[in-house]
Image (cartoon, grey):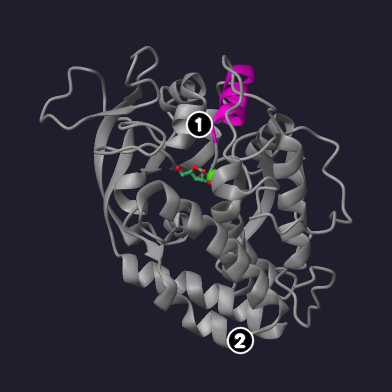
Amino acid sequence: MTNECFIFTFSYSTNHISPTKKDKLIKLLLDVDTGIDDALALFYLAHAQQKGQIEILGSSTVGGNVEVGQTTQNTLKIWEMLELDIPVASGAEKPLMVPLNTAPFVHGDDGLGNTFLPAPEKKPSEESATEMILRLSRKYSGELTLLTTAPLTNIAVALLQDPGLAKRIRKVVIMGGAVFTGNVSAVAEANIANDPEAARIVFRSGMEMTLVGLDVTHEVYWEEEDLRALVKIANERSGFLLQIIDFISSAYESLSGWKRCVLHDPLAAGVCLFPDLVKTEKRYVDVELTGELTRGMTVVDRRGRTPLGEENMLVALEVDAERFKTQLMESLLAWARVG
Ligand code: BDR
Ligand code: CA
């Protein structure tokens, strides 16, 4: 398969939506480490924007699945493939206190399943991730939904610079953590484990938060039979999507013995639009920083009384997996069919 050209015959922009309707759209800011499942989340959100459900105002990037230079390139490239002119602001190269731990085995050396796409035409924004987050939070005070699908370094840095950010954000949906399980360790999830100090700053900030962790994201996955409609399209676009899905599915197979594409970041994107995709509990959650076996664990206090502290976020514990899988597949099919 060549990756030379992706031809577009319709646009995913919001230009066709009337100004009054536009005012009522969910205004979204993303912080990503694109990454295969981050990329799938961008496809989903682009489709939601095209349907007039959201307005994507900006995206910031951070080092995570791969180095920040690559997550920035990947984010620009995916927006370009979707013909969307969304600013991409580059952020933290590494976590606050420790070196960066990338995951090329899971996402590929290029973060996109070793598809090695040609470089995007657009450049990143002049402003940094932190500058973008703070600027948009002031411009749209009380209106912004922030979706994070990456280590929380950029958000923590923004909060350290301006703690008032917490009150200007309408809510944050965080792909991260878990109540009962882990992936990079027995009890820790990658996005939180990659920068636990940043996660603690965010968790203690007073923001409205929803935690979409592994307890629910592990329930939402594609296996081979879920991909038939995409396979049938058999063009360059479906080929690209199937290539990245196969890469991450094979990585999961090597790690767990089960070939499947787990839809972590797309589900968090889905929860921004449809909070009722998940059942939640309001709980006190903090991050373990020092445990020899437990660093990066999200500690969720589920006792009736919470002596550890006030409930600070909604934690997702159940998910309507079929409803979300259908929505996500529809968004991929809509894009692939045009190719
Ligand atoms: C999370 O870690 C990253 O590898 C994925 O992109 C996702 O955000 C899952 O633990
Ligand atoms: Ca991610």
Q: Residue furthest left?
A: 304
Residue at numbered disc 1: 167
Span colored in magenta: 151-162
Residue 7 on image: x %, y %: 81, 78
Among the two numbered marks 1 and 2 on one chain, the one whose residue lies closer to the N terminus:
1
Foreground pick, 228 / 315: 228
Q: Which residue is mark 2?
A: 233
| Amino acid type, residue under disc 1 in the picture | Lys
**The residue positioned farthest toward the bottom in the image shown:** 232
Q: Main secondary structure of the magenta part?
A: helix
**Residue 212 colored in magenta in the image:** no
The residue closer to the viewer here, 156 or 102, is 102
Residue 154 highlighted magenta (yes or no): yes
Q: Inspect the image, locate mark 2, and give the three-letter code of the amino acid beneath it.
A: Ile
SS at mark 2 in the image: helix
Q: Is residue 72 left or right of residue 107?
A: right
Local crowd size for mark 2, using a 10 Å CA cut-off: few (<14), some (14–19), many (≥20): some
Q: Is residue 279 above or below residue 105?
A: below
Distance between mark 1 and mark 2 Cα atoms: 46 Å
Secondary structure of the residue carrying tag 1 is: helix
Q: Residue at x 58, y 70 (%)?
A: 242
Residue 87 placement, left or right of 231: right
State left or right for residue 302 relative to residue 24: left
Q: Position of residue 192 (x, y in %)?
A: 45, 31
